[in-house]
Image (tube, rainbow, N blue to C red):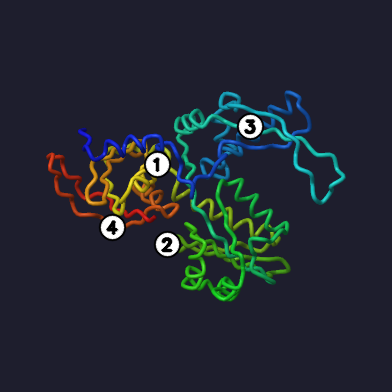
Amino acid sequence: MKTPSLLVPILAAAACLLSMPAQAVAVPGLYEARVPVADQSGPERSNALQQAFDAVLVRITGDRAAGGSLAATLGNPNQYIQQYRYEQAPADPANPSAAPGLLLWAKFDAGVVDKGLRAAHARLWGAERPRTLVWLGLPDRILNASDGTPLMQALLTAAQQRGIVLVFPAMDSTDKAALSAADISGFNDERIRAASQRYHADAVLAGAVAPAEGQFAARWQWLSPDKVEDWQTPAGDQSLVSVDGVQVAADRFAARYAVAPDSTDQDGVALQVDGIGDLDAYAKVLAYLGSLTPVRAVHVQRVAGGSVYYSLDIHGSLDNLESALVLGGLLSNTGTAAPAAASSDAQAAIPAPLHYSYKP
C-alpha cells in the first residue's frame, strides 16, 4: 500500500504509541494474582500457583467456572508462569496485633496463556473493560465512594476478582439533588442516566437492596449506551446479594466483550473516524485501535478532511469490535458512512466503512 505523503510524519511520530493501552478502560494486572500461603514449602507453593492461575483464568475468560475444567485442560500452571515472589500480607485492621501473613504473588505470561486458551477453544476477554458506575440503594442509604464498610470492601474484592472497574457516586449535594433512593428502586432510567453523566462511565449498574423474608433481596438494572437489562437476586445475606449484582454484571460484560471461542478472523474491516484534526488525536485513536482485543492489525488507508480511513484485521465478530470501539468514550458511533470518494492518487475508496467520531 502506498502511504500518502501527508501521513509520513504522522506515522513516524505515532509509531511509538502503538502499544499504549487506552488508559480510560485498560485494566492492569489481569495476568497476576496474590494467594495466601502458610509457608514457602514446595507443596504449598504448587497449591498456591494453581489457585493464582485459576484466578487469572476467571478474569481473562470472564467465566466464573474457568478455574475448574478449563484449568485442568490447560495443565500445569508452571508452564505459564513468568515470575513469582513471596510478600507479607497487609496488617488486618480488625486485629492489628496479629502477625502478618504470607502471600505468594504470581505473574503469568500473557502470550502463552492466550495461546493456550485459543487451543482450548476458550473465550478471551482483553484488558479493555467497561468503567462501571454503581448506584446501590440500601435500606438506610445510597452507597457512596467514601464508604469504608465491609460491604464496600466485598464489592471491590468481587470487582478485582472479575477484573472490572467500579466507580461509586460521591453522594454530595449534586448527586442528592439529581437522584433519590426512590429513583433507584423504581429504576427511573432517565434520572439515573442524567445523574450518571458527571462520572463519565461506560456503563451504569443500579441496584435496590431491600429486606425480604428476614434477609435481603435485590433487584438490578444494567444500563449501557445501547441497551438496558434487569434481573433479581433472591433473598440472602446483604453482602452476598450485593456482590451478586457485581458478579452478574461481570458475566454480562464478558458475554458482550469477550472474543468467543473458535471465532474466525476477518481482514479488511473498513472503519472511518471523523474529527481527527491534529497529531495528538491521530496518535490517541491509532493507539486505542491497536490495543483492542478483537483487533489484530491496524492499517491506515488515507487521511482526508479531518477523517482517517482504516482497514482493520480482526479476530471475532463485528459485534465484538463495535462493542470495544465505544469503550472509554474515545469514539462514538455515527452509523454507516457512504463510500468515500477516491483520492487524487487513485487509491481505492473504502466501501461503507464503520463510521465513528473522535471525542476529545
- Could you classify mark 3 by the number of other residues whose Cα lies within 10 Å: few (under 14), some (14-19), or many (20 or more)? many
Cα separation, mark 3 vs mark 4, equals: 44 Å
Q: Disc 3 marks which residue?
A: 106
Q: Which of the two discs, 3 and 2, labels the residue nearer the N terminus?
A: 3
Q: Disc 4 marks which residue?
A: 335
Q: Secondary structure at mark 1?
A: helix
Q: Secondary structure at mark 3?
A: strand
Whether tag 1 and tag 2 are in contact, CB under 8 A, the answer is: no
Q: Which of the two discs, 3 and 1, labels the residue nearer the N terminus?
A: 3
Q: Secondary structure at mark 2?
A: strand
* Of 99 and 317, the residue lying toward us: 99
Left or right: 53 with respect to 130? right
Cα separation, mark 2 vs mark 4, equals: 17 Å
Residue type, mark 1 in image: Ala
Q: Position of residue 110 (x, y in %)?
A: 51, 32
Q: Disc 2 marks which residue?
A: 227
Outermost residue on the right side: it is: 97
Q: Which of the two discs, 1 and 2, labels the residue nearer the N terminus?
A: 2
Left or right: 306 with respect to 132? left
Q: Which residue appears at 58% of the width and 26% of the height? A: 82
